[in-house]
Image (cartoon, helix red, strand yellow):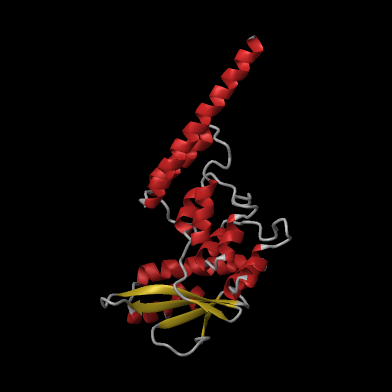
């Protein structure tokens, strides 16, 4: 009788824990949809502290990877192991790569994910990108395995700081590039590797990665600054700066 009672109690505790996990998973989904970063991170941390099973929120992580939502991936960086298999034997990197999401893949690479992990069929993230006809993503994954990857990220960080100080002003950008303070950036400047365009400045991060600052004007006439990457000859526009991710807005 005593053993039976203990077993029933254990089952009850497990059922209550499962219900709590379902409740917080639902709350987590709502906060993600509302882009409330602080609340998302608090819920994830709470789940970790309460000992929820590791996969309690992985459906949402997998969904973010499939959609290329690197901001939500950033929320999970506080608690998740990105190298875990999260959906049908797939990691976040393989899911993002298979769906051609350059920014999400770049974010995960910045987080130091293992690019050599393969699924049960021996398919890597690089393979997933190629077979899904996303050669620019495959080239990015390949570039991240090169010894020059840290200096590519350092260039991206330097350019982000440079743009923040210069603003979307062509004359200011040109003037700052001639100053001693930014000689370390200017030394990496190259001629435009693609068709000539006004308002573009390109810099070489490595032998196979170039990063461009691109002035862009939207439909309302507002001029801003975007980034473009050229990876093994594949140009990708509107590349997001994500080192580290800004998730606590």
Residue 192 screen position, x and y as percent = 50, 86
Extreme residue in the bottom direction: 196
Quarter occupied by residue 137: bottom right
Residue 18 screen position, x and y as percent = 52, 32
Relative to 4, is 108 above or below? below
Extreme residue in the top direction: 1
Relative to 243, is 210 above or below? below
Residue 139 screen position, x and y as percent = 62, 73
Relative to 213, is 86 above or below? above
Q: Is residue 173 left or right of 7 when viewed as pictured?
A: left
Quarter occupied by residue 224: bottom left
Residue 33 screen position, x and y as percent = 38, 51
Residue 148 visible = no
The residue located at (46%, 41%) in the rendering is: 25
- Quadrant containing the N terminus is top right
Relative to 87, is 54 above or below? above
The residue located at (53%, 48%) in the rendering is: 59
Give the mark count.
Answer: 0
Q: Nearer the viewer, residue 163 or 238?
A: 238
The residue located at (57%, 18%) in the rendering is: 9
Residue 133 visible = yes
């Amino acid at each position: 009788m005593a053993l039976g009672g203990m077993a029933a109690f254990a089952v009850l505790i497990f059922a209550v824990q499962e219900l709590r996990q379902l409740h917080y998973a639902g709350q987590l989904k709502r906060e993600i949809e509302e882009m409330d970063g602080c609340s998302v991170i608090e819920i994830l941390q709470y789940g970790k502290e309460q000992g929820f099973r590791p996969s309690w929120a992985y459906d949402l992580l997998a969904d973010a990877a499939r959609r290329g939502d690197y901001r939500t991936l950033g929320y999970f960086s506080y608690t998740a192991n990105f190298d875990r298999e999260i959906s049908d034997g797939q990691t976040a990197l393989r899911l993002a790569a298979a769906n051609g999401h350059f920014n999400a893949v770049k974010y995960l690479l910045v987080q130091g994910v293992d690019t050599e992990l393969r699924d049960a069929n021996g398919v890597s993230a690089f393979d997933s990108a190629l077979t899904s006809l996303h050669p620019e993503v495959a080239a990015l994954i390949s570039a991240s395995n090169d010894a020059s990857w840290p200096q590519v990220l350092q260039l991206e960080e330097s350019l982000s700081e440079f743009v923040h100080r210069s603003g979307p002003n062509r004359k200011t950008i040109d003037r700052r590039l001639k100053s001693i303070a930014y000689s370390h950036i200017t030394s990496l400047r190259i001629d435009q590797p693609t068709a000539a365009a006004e308002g573009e400045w390109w810099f070489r991060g490595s032998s196979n990665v170039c990063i461009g600052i691109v002035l862009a004007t939207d439909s309302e006439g507002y001029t801003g600054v975007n980034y473009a990457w050229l990876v093994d000859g594949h140009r990708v526009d509107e590349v997001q700066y994500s080192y580290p991710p800004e998730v606590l807005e």
